[in-house]
Amino acid sequence: MFDVPVLLVLIVLVALVFDFTNGAHDCANAIATVVSTKVVTPRFAVAAAAALNLGGALLGTEVAKTLGGGIVLPEVVQGSHVLVLAALVGAIAWNCITWYFGIPSSSSHALIGGLIGAAVGHGGFATLNAGGIVGKVLLPLVLSPLAGFAAGFLIMWAIYWICARIARGKVNAAFRRLQLLSAGFMATSHGLNDAQKTMGIVTLALLIFGKVDSVEVPLWVKLCCAMAMAMGTAVGGWKIVKTMGHRIFKLEPVHGFAAEGAASLVISGASMLGAPVSTTHTISACIFGVGSSKRLSAVRWGVAGQLVTAWILTLPASALVGFISYWLLHFIWN
């Protein structure tokens, strides 16, 4: 039905749409706390987050290589021209559903789930890289929120200890300024991890179509994905900002600094290891950790239950849509 070059162009365009929705959906990760604590205006926060997401997206390719060759076996799916498109449809569908309802689910795991579902639709479970999925997806899925919770708790506890004899007003005044640094670090680490995921999926498409010989990200792919992420961030996701910044725990500047600093450390570390972690999972867990350092009752644990439910559903739901999308597209193609 389509010439291969036309289909490849379509896949790249849809991938960039996903990257755009990812930026719009996940910009809250970088700016929710700094907006909710009224350190800066929403407009300034979104503009700064967009610029820093752009810069972070160009800093590495380890996560892109994981998405390109660590989830499915490229040699097994070689020639399946609709596979990547089906994966993207699954991810975008789940992103749109959760964006509409203001649920801070994971765009990362939506993309991975869509890719897994489409690959299984193409050739069964033999298409999957089981070691890569366990080591780079499932373990980080569990460990990154736990690490975020612990880091948020410990950083906040350390701040309480250091600032115990300082007037609360002076502490918050200082951290209003320091939170600008932590929010910037968070936005950069978000771009470093999240934009690379689309780079990896586009590179996998190029490999399937025989346009590249290995999972090495071309420069034009880096630039296009970084720009799409930045433009999506500029649009913003205000429903998710409200959930992240207000419903979990009543944040003050010191809490925002601790949560963003903790999340940035976890996400940057994962990026260097090539693990496509969820920035949403991580920052949410950090906020829970920060709130728990004050007292457990300060955190709205009912919201935690809703978020965990969304996290659990993301992989299988997007995989199911990816599986169905593969067969529909395969039917159209043939």
Image (tube, rainbow, N blue to C red):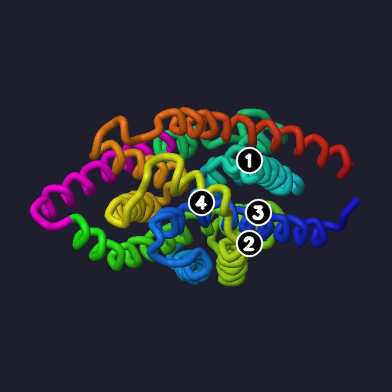
Q: Is residue 176 visible?
A: yes
- The 10 Å Cα crowd at callout 3, few under 14, some 14 to 19, many 20 or more, is many
Q: Are marks 1 and 2 in contact (CB under 8 Å)?
A: no
Indicate left or right for 258 with 168 as reference.
Answer: right
Q: Residue at horizontal 28%, vertical 36%?
A: 292
Q: Which residue is mark 2?
A: 212
Q: Which residue is mark 1?
A: 101
- The 10 Å Cα crowd at callout 2, few under 14, some 14 to 19, many 20 or more, is some
In reply to whether residue 283 is colored magenta, the answer given is no
Q: CA separation, marks 2 and 4? A: 39 Å
Element on which disc 3 rests: helix
Q: CA separation, marks 4 and 1? A: 12 Å
- The span picked out in magenta is 141-167
Say which amino acid is labelled 3: Phe
Indicate which label's residue lies in the foreground, 3 or 1.
Answer: 1
Say which amino acid is labelled 4: Val
Q: Which is more toward the observer, 86 or 182? A: 182
Indicate which label's residue lies in the foreground, 1 or 2.
Answer: 1
Tell me which label, 3 or 1, sits earlier in the chain: 3
- Picture disc at residue 18: 3
Element on which disc 1 rests: loop
- Counting from the top left corner in percent of width and height, residue 39 is at 38, 64
Say which amino acid is labelled 1: Phe
Q: Which residue is mark 4?
A: 241
Tell me which label, 2 or 4, sits earlier in the chain: 2
Q: Are marks 3 and 4 in contact (CB under 8 Å)?
A: no
Q: Are marks 2 and 3 in contact (CB under 8 Å)?
A: no
Q: Which is more toward the observer, 315 or 103? A: 103
